[in-house]
Every structure is written in C-alpha cells, then in structure tokens.
Amino acid sequence: MRSLRSRLSALWLMLAMSGAATAYLLLESFQQSSEARVARAEDLVVRSCRDIADRYQFFVTGWSGSASVDDRLRQDLLPVIRSALAGAPGVEGGIWQAASGSLAYGYPTYEGTGPKTDLPAAELGVIEQVNAEARRSGRPATIRNDGRSQSLIVHACPLRGPLQDVTAWTMTRAATAEGPAYTHLLIGLIVLALTRLGSAIWLAWILVSWSRRIAAIETALGGATGTADLPHLPQTGARELDRLVDAVNDAGHRLSAERRRAAAAERLAAVGRLSANLAHEIRNPIAAMRLKAENALASSDPARKSSALEAILQQVARLDALLRDLLATTQAVQPTPRNVALEGFLRSTIDAHRELAAHHALALRSVCSSPRAACFDPSQLQRALDNLILNAIQNTPAGGEIVVAAEIHGGRLLFRVTDSGPSVDAGIRDRLFEPFVSTRADGTGLGLAIVREIARAHQGEARLGQTHHGNSFEISLPWQPS
C-alpha cells in the first residue's frame, strides 16, 4: 500500500514533469513560429523583388532614351520602386547597377517621421554582395544573416532592358526573439512558472504539514508502550486526520472500558479458582483429621489414640505449610538486595539438596559461567531455587541429572534449573506458574507461584525455557553488578 507521502510526492513530481513538458512545447512553438516568420519574410522579399522587376520591365518598354545613368533617370526610377513596395510592409529595396551602384532606393512603408531616402549604410556590403551574385549567376539570389533577435534577409533578381548589369534588390528584417510572439511566450512561461512554483510550494507545505501531524500521532501512540490502554490523541487541525483521531480516541475509551470489565471478570474468576482450589486443599486434611478423630473416640486402645493424634498433627502441619505458601504468593515480597558471589551462592544452594538427590539416585551439580558478584536478595532467591530444585527432584526419574546454572546473558542475570525428567504437559505450560497448578497429584501448585512472585519482586520474570530433553526453569533478573 502506498502512503499519502509517496502519493503527494508522485503528484509533485508529475507537476514538475508537466511544467517542464509545457515549457518545452512553448519554446518549440515559439521556435516554429519564428521560423515561420522568417519563411514569410523570405517569401515577401522574393515577391517584392519580382514586383520591382515587373514594373521596371513596364518602365523600359518602348525605351527611346539614352542608356547612360543621370539624375533624371534616377528620379524616373523612384516611382517604380515606391509603387512596387507600397504593398510590402517592412520591405525596402531598389535598383542596382554594377558600375554606378544604387540607381534608385525606396522604403515606402517606413514608419519614421518622414520618408527614408538614404541606403542603410550598415547593410550596404550585403546589398552589394547579393546584387553581384544575382548578376553573375543570372538568377535570383538571397542572403540571410541570423542575429540574436532578428534575421536580415536580402534578395536580388536580374533585370532585362537597355541598361547593362542592372539588378533589383529587396531587404527586410524578421524578428526571432522579439515581437508579439516573443511577448506571448514570456507571459506564458512566467504564468507557467508561477503556477507550477505555487503548486509545488503548496504541495510541499501539505506534505510537510501532514507528515508533522502524522509524526505527532505516531509519537503519541509510541509513548504509550508501557500501558495496555491507547493514549488520548490531541487534535491536529486537519479535518480528515481529526476524524481519524476522534475514531481512535473513541476506540481507546471503549477498549479501556472493556479491559476494566475483563480485568474485573478475570479477578473474580481467579478468586473463584483460588477459592475452589484452596477449599479442595483444605478439605482433604480436614477429612483425614475427622476420620482419625472418630476412630480415636471409638477405640479404647491408647496406642491407636496416640497414632490418631500424630496423624492429626501431621495434617495440621500440612495445613500450616499450605497457608504459609499461600501467604507468600499473596503478600508483597520486599527484597533486600546485597552483593552476592554467584559461584559460592550456587554451591551453598545445592549442598542443601545433595542428600535428597542422592536418595533418589540423581546427580546434582552447579555451573557458574560468571565469577563476578551480583546484587540481589540471597534468601529469597535461594528459596526460589529451592522450590525449583525440589520440583526437579520430584520430576526426574532415578539415574537422571539436575543442573543449576547462573550466567550473564543479554545484559541480564539468568538462573536456570534443568532436569532430565519428562517434559511438562503442553496443556498446562501457559498456566504453570499460577497458584494450585501442579503436575503431581500430591502437589499444592504453590511452589512455582512463589518463584514467580520472588522474580517479579526483583523486577524479573520466571519462565519455562526451551530445551530438547527434560525441562528448564529460568529466573531472569536485571543485571546489577556489585
């Protein structure tokens, strides 16, 4: 799925490409229009030169005068030029003789304050060159000089008649970078640049603004990692995003309410399970004590009465141990941490269980991969490890091995008790550390719950680790070196 940022970026890129393509088309159009203007100017000077030739031919028809050039001839040729160029705006021209130079010159459409009668001095060399070319080839000739803002077009065509080496010439200028077309191009490019620049700035502002608002929402959502409830998101000022924010806030309120109801129901269910299990654990010793007491009352044998009292005391001790363990799981544990040498701590912990392990034909050993000292409550951690070791001794068949290890892994202090007994049933793995959950018929299910509470009191956790054979119970604590 594409993000809004990528879509707006694609739109911004499309606008830039569209602007570039439009500018290119405008430039091409202007270039073509410039070439068209030059072509029209060339056609105009050719037709104008032909008109001069036609009128000159009419002028010399029935010529009876002298073939020499004089002032009168020059004056007579002026109307020929003016009449031929009167309908050709922007075109100037005349009649040229190789020996005498300009015989007549006219620019009837000149837009100055008066008629223009002098030859253009700057273009005189080009005029002489094109007339010489036409006279030498006997055919019309054209010279075109392209400048930065205009093109100069000079055309000459030979004339027939009594005068020798005479040619007609015309000249005009075609604007290539100025004039109305150039002005229109500039206006179009300016408008295009302004619209594209404005669109780009507007889209960039939308992109940055939305990115900031979305980042603010992400920051607000990311700041709630320590709680299960959704945070209350502030309004962004964007109507579309605010609808989403309102929906998230509303969903968060409903989720919080449902979570509170679920937590209350879970607490009630937990209390119900605890009560049921506790009633079951208490009912069995009470039933045994009642049976022994009834037997003692019905018997007159002092030895039988003494045996019954001893059995009752054993059940009382069982109930007392049950209540102590239950209190240990429900009361808050306040650890008193101090510096402890890990290797000596493990050795003293397993020494207390060597005799019991030997009685069950089990090997019990410790492994400490870190000789450093750590900071924790040794009495509480020893009680937790005692429960795990006793649980392992009861779960491991004769000939097995129990390993108690301590190591520093991933910045945490890890205690691990591994046995080679049968693996925990998959049906109770998720509830193994809950009170009254046990794999043995004679177990109370409070030992692992006590381990979990001690680990939590140290800001750690207790879990069933991964192992290929047997079971591996772990206590993971934050590493606090001494």
Image: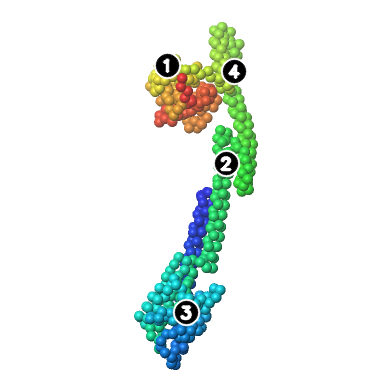
Of callouts 3 and 2, the N-terminal one = 3
Mark 3: few/some/many CA within 10 Å (<14, 14-19, 20+): many
Asked if residue 432 is positioned above or below residue 247 in the image, the reply reads above
Distance of mark 2 from mark 1, alpha carbons? 52 Å
Disc 4 or disc 2, which is closer to the eye? 2
Mark 1 surroundings: few (<14), some (14-19) or many (≥20) residues within 10 A: few
Q: Are marks 1 and 3 in contact (CB under 8 Å)?
A: no
The residue carrying mark 3 is 105
> In front here: 473 or 28?
28
Give the alpha-carbon distance from disc 1 to disc 4, as whole Å. Answer: 43 Å
Lower position in the chain sequence, tag 4 or tag 3: 3
As drawn, 75 above or below 423: below
Query: Mark 4–mark 3 contact, CB under 8 Å?
Result: no
Q: Picture coordinates of residue 7 (x, y %)?
A: 52, 52
Q: CA distance from mark 1 to mark 3?
A: 124 Å
The residue tagged 2 is: 216
Question: What's under tag 1, amino acid-wise?
Answer: Gly
Residues at discs 4 and 2 in contact (Cβ within 8 Å): no
Question: Where is mark 4, residue-wise?
Answer: 286
Label located before the other in sequence (1 or 4): 4
328 horizontally vs 393: left or right? right
